Structures are given as structure tokens and as C-alpha cells.
Image: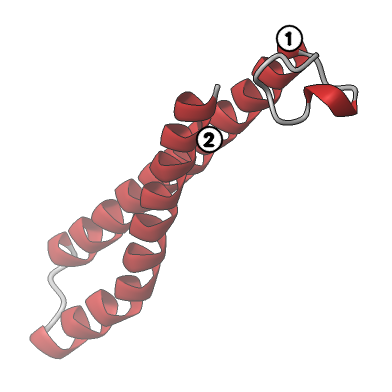
């Protein structure tokens, strides 16, 4: 008899199926939080550089150095939110 869960015939019951997607949801939340921490770090790094009175070229170099970290953090945050949505939708 099928319970409506694709893996229930393979030994994974309804409770374990829900637990698996809870882990996926919390893992996505952790990814999103890590991305958010990276974004905050980027903001603080540029603010520190602006307050230190660097020249235009030096400030531009700092911002160019932070830009890849900023984009990676944003991507990680978006990826984490997508995983949360998948976990909630299937859980």
C-alpha cells in the first residue's frame, strides 16, 4: 500500500520523510545566514576603508577586492533561500 510518499515503499516512513526535509530546510537557513554574514562583512570592510581616508585609487582597489566576496555571499544567501523553499514545499 502506498502512503503518497515516493520513498515510503523503500523503507522510509512518513515521519522520517518529514525529518529529512526539516534538515534540508534548516541547512538552507544556515546557508542563507552564512551569506548574510558575508554581506555584513563586505559592508563593514568598505565602511572601514572609507573612514580610513584612503585616496580614490586605494578605495577603488578595496572595493574591487570586496566585490567578488559580495557576489559570492549574495549567491550563497539566495541559494540558501531556494533550499529553504524546497524544504518547506516538499516537507
Residue at the (55%, 21%) spot, across then down? 91
Furthest residue toward right:
11
Does residue 62 lie above or below 57 as drawn? Answer: above
Between 60 and 91, the residue placed more toward the observer is 91
Residue at the (44%, 54%) spot, across then down? 76
Percent x, y of residue 74? 33, 56
**Secondary structure under the numbered disc 1 in the rendered image:** helix
The first of marks 1 and 2 along the sequence is 1
Q: Residues within 10 Å of mark 1 (few under 14, many from 20)?
A: few
Q: Identify residue for label 1.
A: 15
Percent x, y of residue 87? 52, 30
Q: CA distance from mark 1 to mark 2?
A: 23 Å
Give the image quarter of residue 8. Answer: top right
**Secondary structure under the numbered disc 2 in the rendered image:** helix
Q: Identify residue for label 2.
A: 30
Percent x, y of residue 2? 75, 17
Amino acid at each position: 500500500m502506498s502512503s503518497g510518499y515516493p520513498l515510503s515503499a523503500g523503507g522510509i516512513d512518513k515521519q522520517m520523510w518529514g525529518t529529512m526535509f526539516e534538515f534540508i530546510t534548516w541547512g538552507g537557513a544556515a546557508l542563507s545566514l552564512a551569506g548574510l554574514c558575508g554581506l555584513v562583512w563586505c559592508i563593514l570592510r568598505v565602511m572601514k576603508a572609507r573612514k580610513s581616508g584612503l585616496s580614490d585609487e586605494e578605495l577603488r582597489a578595496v572595493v574591487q577586492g570586496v566585490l567578488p566576496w559580495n557576489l559570492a555571499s549574495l549567491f550563497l544567501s539566495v541559494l540558501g533561500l531556494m533550499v529553504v523553499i524546497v524544504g518547506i514545499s516538499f516537507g
